Amino acid sequence: MMREIGVTEIIDATPLDRLGIPVVTAVRPGAARGGARTHTGAGKDPLHARVSAMMGAIERYSAEYRGDRMEYATYEEIGPGRAVHPEDLILSREHEQGEMIHWMPAWDILNDEEVYVPGNAVFHPYDSLGMAVPLFRSDANGLAAGNVTEEAVLTALFEVIERDALSVADQKRDLGRRLTIASGCAAREVLDRFEENGIEIHLWLLSGKTGIPTVAAAADDTVTRDPAMIIVGSGTHLSPEVAALRALTEVARNRVSYLQQGGAGDPRRETVIRRAGYERLKRINRIWFAGADAVDIADVPDASTDRFDLDIRQVLEAVRPHTDRVCVCDLSRTPVPVVRVVVPGFEISYMDPDRRRSAQG
């Protein structure tokens, strides 16, 4: 599929970091303007890392606007009963009554009916075609690929829940409880790899409003004492062990991504980090290193099953009290299914600080 989606090279980036945790980068130079041209994946073994990188490339390729038919209308014209109100997506600006925007059909799997969602929430990068003012900066939240559609939907749901939990924790300045891993599992093996290399990992079980385990990890490289290596990662899953593993491998991925770019990815952030220095940056981010009550991962309920549809059903019951809709838009353009999941009301400010409820007035 590399040729079909424009991936020209797959690079084993594992040697860039002393951890040795497998990290792979897929290079897609023909990405749409404003989209990512590299897609980095990490995993417990090289195969998982390679698949992760390719899935990232496939989902981003599939999310680009390619002349898809969109409705151009006001919210009032589409109809309140048939459309998600733009303001329920937590905008970065005020939505004017009677404002013309693009709409895409989706399937509301919470109510089992068709619904229209703003195109700005579906495509990334979003192309307004010069016809509409964007409601917010487009992003990849809730965008996921899978071996089957159900896997893509479940993965996307977990991502939306994860970003919501991170946003709420950041707003409250409360990360919940410390998480310990005493038992032997895949997450413990990866955690040992960090510790053997002088990298302290601070694991947190975020409170979250759904009760679905969301684990956040902060890495402190005590060997290099490089402020840029104070890196975080996160993961959500019905299985707390899988959530922890995702958080840890995301830290490994983010470390390598930084080392690959050498700070060139975000020069402004690099300048701030270097000026602050190691000790000061730790103080600024002290919430990640603070003390708190702890819970062992073995004591966190595992509600996962061996079927995607059953897991989806459990997730829907967990989000039902907090939203009126769970919208799924099929963006598949290759044999690998890709979906965008939009859950109105779920927070996004951790990714986009401009999208806070107060910003809407």
Image (tube, rainbow, N blue to C red):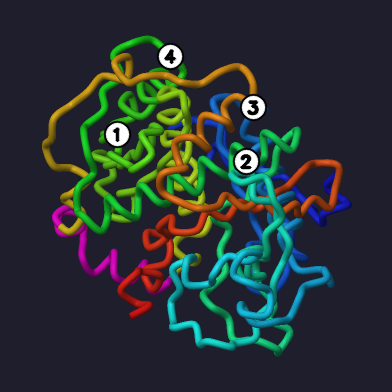
**Residue 102 to residue 49: above or below:** below
Q: Horizontal placement of 352 versus 43: left or right?
A: left
According to the picture, the residue beneath numbered tag 3 turns out to be 308
Mark 1 and mark 3 lie on one chain; the one further toward the N terminus is 1
**Residue 360 to residue 245: above or below:** below
**Residue 112 to residue 203: above or below:** below
- Please tell me which residue lies in front, 133 or 255: 133
Please name the amino acid that badge 3 sits on: Phe
Q: Which mark is residue 24?
A: 2
Please name the amino acid that badge 4 sits on: Cys
According to the picture, the residue beneath numbered tag 1 turns out to be 205
Q: Residue at the location (22% across, 39% down)? A: 176
Using the numbered discs, state the Cα–Cα distance from disc 4 to disc 2 in whole angstroms.
Answer: 23 Å
According to the picture, the residue beneath numbered tag 4 turns out to be 185
Q: Residue at the location (29% across, 64% down)? A: 273
Q: Position of residue 53 (x, y in %)?
A: 65, 43
Q: Which residues are magenta?
A: 267-283
Q: Residue at the location (65% across, 28% down)? A: 309
State the image quarter where residue 38 is shown.
Answer: bottom right
Using the numbered discs, state the Cα–Cα distance from disc 2 to disc 3 in whole angstroms.
Answer: 26 Å
Category of crowding for the residue at label 4, using alpha-carbon neighbours closer than 10 angstroms: few (below 14), some (14–19), many (at least 20):
few
State the image quarter where residue 290 is shown.
Answer: top left
Q: How would you classify the magenta stretch by its main secondary structure?
A: helix
